[in-house]
Amino acid sequence: MMSMEKQEDYFSQNEKELMTYFGYTGNLGLLKLRFKFLKTWLLHKSAYSSALSSWIVKMQRWRGVKIGNNCHFAPYVLIDLLYPKMITIGNNVTISSNVMIFAHVNPTTNPSMKKHGYPRKVNSVKINDGVIISPGSIITAGTTIGKNCIIGAGSVVSTNIPDNSVVLGNPARIIKKLDL
């Protein structure tokens, strides 16, 4: 079992990384950081289990997610809790239940591993116009999904997807090109 002191070290390390990323310093910066994440968490919580797509879109926009017009979000969509402003979603996009979209990867709080090639990475995600993301899919940091793509259920998108593609699997692979 991990000691409470060790857990605090990991938490402090992550907090320091976030403060550096957002350009915060000192106690006031720490307070700003904590309020920033309280706000985004409350808005996410309000959106997460709502059955009203328009409410979900509104709450996600208030969090800072850039969302185009005429989008439909199902309940239980998780959009990055730490970096919502790094997510851009085009017009006429459908996102189904249990989809997760991440703009960051923080694989470990182990300082040795962080120094040897496994640091926190923050990269934007862009989902272009007309995309359909099926239930249970995961969109990872640094990916762009082209226009009019269909992401099959349970797919893990970790590379850029060209326009008019149907992808499926883990990792997601193109299984068909659409004639549009």
Image (tube, rainbow, N blue to C red):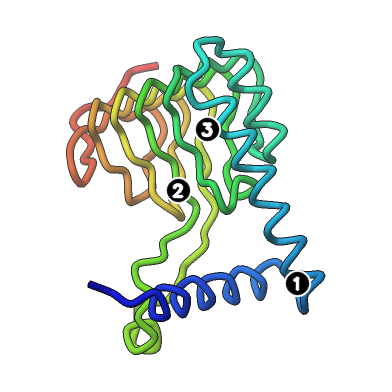
Image quadrant where residue 5 sits? bottom left
Q: Where is residue 22 drawn, in percent x and y? A: 70, 66
What kind of residue is marked 2? Phe
The residue drawn where x is 18% and y is 43% is: 170
The residue carrying mark 2 is: 102
Identify the secondary structure beneath mark 2.
loop
Circle 1 residues within 10 Å: few <14, some 14–19, many ≥20: some
Disc 3 crowd rating (10 Å Cα; few below 14, some 14-19, many 20+) is many
**Count of numbered labels shown in the rendering:** 3
Mark 1 or 2: in front is 1
Q: Label 1's element?
A: loop
Task: Point out which mark residue 128 bears.
Answer: 3
- Which residue occupies the foreground of this view, 98 or 178? 98
Residue 156 placed where, x, y %?
A: 27, 42
* Residue 6 in which image quadrant: bottom left
Q: Quadrant of the N terminus?
A: bottom left
Which residue is located at x 35 percent, y 80 percent? 110
Residue annotated with mark 1 = 24
Crowding near pointer 2: few (<14 within 10 Å), some, many (20+)?
many
Vertical placement of residue 8 versus 150, above or below: below
**What amino acid does circle 1 point to?**
Tyr
Horizontal side, residue 22 vs residue 79: left or right: right
Q: Name the foreground residue: 74 vs 68.
A: 74
Spot the residue most to the top: 52
| Element assignment for label 3 | loop
Q: Earlier in the sequence, mark 3 or mark 2?
A: 2
Do labels 3 and 2 touch, CB within 8 Å?
no
Labels 1 & 2 near each other (Cβ < 8 A)? no
Residue type pointed to by label 3: Asn
Quadrant of image for the C terminus: top left
